[in-house]
Image (cartoon, coloured by chain):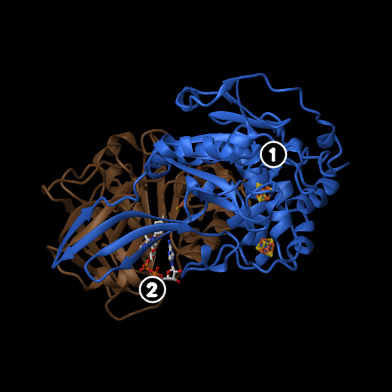
Amino acid sequence: MKKLPLSQLDALFAAIAEKRRLYIPAGEAGTASFTPWREGLKLTDALNTARSAKDLFFPQVENLADFKVTGKQIQVIENRDPAEPFVLFGVRACDCRSFDILDKVFLCDPVDTYYQARREQGTVVTLACTEPEETCFCTALGIDPTDPAGDVTAWMAEGFLYLRANTARGEELLSSLPLLEEGEKPEQDRSVFEKLPLRDLDWSAFGGERMMERFNAPQWASLAESCLGCGTCTFVCPTCQCYDIKDFNTGGGVKRYRCWDSCMYSDFTLMSAGQPRPTQLERFRQRFMHKLVYYPANHEGEFGCVGCGRCLQKCPISMNIVKVARALGEEAKP
Amino acid sequence: MRREALIPQVVQVTDIRRDTPDVKTFRVVDLDGRKPFLHIPGQCAMLSMPGVGEALFSITSSPTNEDYLEFSIKKCGCVTDWLHAIEPGQQVTLRGPYGNGFPVDTDFAGKDLVFVAGGIGLAPLRSVINYVRCYRDRYGTVDIVYGSRSKADLVDYQEILDEWCSEPGISVHLTIDNPQPDWDGHVGFVPNFVKELGFDTGKTVVMCGPPIMIKFTLAGLMEQGFPRDQIYTTLELRMKCGLGRCGRCNIGDKYVCKDGPVFRLDQLDQLPDEY
Ligand SMILES: Cc1cc2nc3c(=O)[nH]c(=O)nc-3n(C[C@H](O)[C@H](O)[C@H](O)COP(=O)(O)OP(=O)(O)OC[C@H]3O[C@@H](n4cnc5c(N)ncnc54)[C@H](O)[C@@H]3O)c2cc1C
Ligand code: SF4
Ligand code: SF4
Ligand code: FES
């Protein structure tokens, strides 16, 4: 394990940024975001970023290809947004787990080469949590916030930053930083996590096996009743991955790009022949069924939620996955 | 570099046939004049004109056709309007094939087959029917029930008359919704016609058409006592990626673009009613 006095954090960032682009969580709580590091940029005091770390691998908008149309002829021009080596510092355990969930979607056959290129270029340095918020429930989903995954795991304790490489890529990053010294991190007190209000959330009613039962639960009507269909919960969520493909006429040609979309929107599934999800009830149900039932059904029981708490903080009507889990979980009890 | 599934290939439309007032059939080859890719009957592909948009269509030609792919396309929006206005020689883009297709070499083998189609729903079934015709000895009896609003709305009418109707061992049953002077065939809706024909419940039924046709035909088949695992149909939902990723086309844990569009009725029974 390596260590560095926290007073030298700026020097560490400068050393990393010398070789590749570095993103760190910066800004005020509520709007903090992963920001390209520049001289003077400080780590945020906020526990987590407002938007999740998925942006770096699955950006909100990206070029797929360009087309040139001349008369009856079409030319495809590969014009991707470049994927350059970068380091993503300060990813929390929940967001890091979200990469595993997105990997299963984007890296299965046929692989999404845009996502893959960014995954291959990105080195993830996670940061262990010490002061979780009341909306956090990663521990209820089997995630250890004190020992997150990633290429490198970092801890802040007693005036030092401790760093442990977990992968070859992480090893490479640490060995390129001569300012690091050898060190062992002190034992962390975990009692704060044992007091989190949502630590005991019960997921036993969910998973792939009881799809029809959960789908037909009467609770959806009251849960979805006041949902505005604003899509905020899907945009801030680190595991939401729905997208749209659109063309933009540039005058000289056509840009085909991909952008985030949301299952909470009414035109998401609209067809001339009809609308399979006609009201907000069906759309609302889709989002939570996907995370808690459909995703696990397709991925060996793993849930599509990492307990980051963003949807708890950001929903304008205070609806969220915890309320859904409680309402449906209650119903499922004998 | 690895091939990206979302980047299409450029292909050329070599022939356009008008089938009905709102359906045209497009023949497509790659820029070397060859068939763009291999497929299974029932699979689909994304056709697009950059700047207009992308849309998914069933491949209506049979895999046994080695020269080109064909798509029968009904005019109903941006991409389809644009396609209806083009002339041969126009290039378009194509990606695919997508979906599971019909189990022509497994479950269908040795079975008596009844195809039931309505309107443009014949498009995916034409691929299977011509495949079955090519390997005729691998299957039992073949019945084709096909209906449209009027005689002019029957897709592939010429091919049906010239090739299917004259082939021994294939029974074609055509119907139109309302009587018209130059029609001496059956008149009436597909579901009733299927009932009247009273097929043996040991046959395998393959259905494709508007939801209302599927619904009532199905009710009739149930009444007659057909087992649900002998009935196949295709589903149509909004699609963008074709890869099970954009999140649009799922029914429960199944993606219609990837796990479908072909489903057996007993498989649909396991899924939420959201289509
Ligand atoms: C598995 C599958 C197979 C299909 N096979 C064929 C075929 O062989 N021949 C054929 O003519 N059509 C087929 N379709 C339907 C075809 O995809 C739509 O008609 C097409 O997307 C409309 O595109 P557009 O740009 O012309 O219309 P748009 O301008 O996009 O829209 C016109 C209207 O169609 C709706 N729409 C968008 N996507 C679809 C969709 N997938 N299905 C129905 N309505 C839609 C829009 O919401 C709008 O109301 C198939 C669809 C699926 C999912
Ligand atoms: S559903 Fe809510 S808590 Fe779960 S990962 Fe998404 S934003 Fe975070
Ligand atoms: S659950 Fe909340 S955040 Fe999500 S769409 Fe509904 S109102 Fe918006
Ligand atoms: S079309 Fe994108 S998931 Fe099926």
* Chain of the residue that carries numbered disc 2 in the rendered image: B
Residue lying at 54% horizontally and 63% vertically, measured from the top left: B216
Q: x, y percentage for residue B213?
A: 49, 64
Q: For the residue with label 1, is its CB less than 8 Å from the closest atom of ligand 2? A: no
Quadrant location, the C terminus of chain B: bottom right
Frontmost residue, A124 versus A305:
A124
For marks 1 and 2, give the one nearer the viewer: 1
Mark 1 touching mark 2, by CB under 8 A? no
* Residue type indicated by callout 1: Gly
Q: Is residue A143 left or right of residue A51?
A: right
Residue at which label 2 appears: B149
Q: For the residue with label 2, is its CB less than 8 Å from the closest atom of ligand 1? A: no
Q: x, y percentage for residue A213?
A: 74, 47
**Mark 2 crowdedness (10 Å alpha carbons): few <14, some 14-19, many ≥20:** some
Residue B111 in view in this figure: no
Under circle 1, the secondary element is: loop
Residue A207 bears which disc, if any? 1
Q: x, y percentage for residue A295?
A: 60, 42
Frontmost residue, A241 versus B76:
A241
Frontmost residue, B108 versus B51:
B51
* Residue type indicated by callout 2: Arg
* Chain of the residue that carries numbered disc 1 in the rendered image: A
Q: x, y percentage for residue A97?
A: 61, 36
Could you confirm whether marks 1 and 2 are on the same chain?
no
Under circle 2, the secondary element is: loop
Residue lying at 22% horizontally and 54% vertically, measured from the top left: A76
Q: Is residue A185 left or right of residue B7?
A: right
Q: Which chain is blue?
A: A
Q: Is residue A286 above or below residue A54?
A: below
Frontmost residue, A240 versus A31:
A31
Colour of chain B as rendered: brown
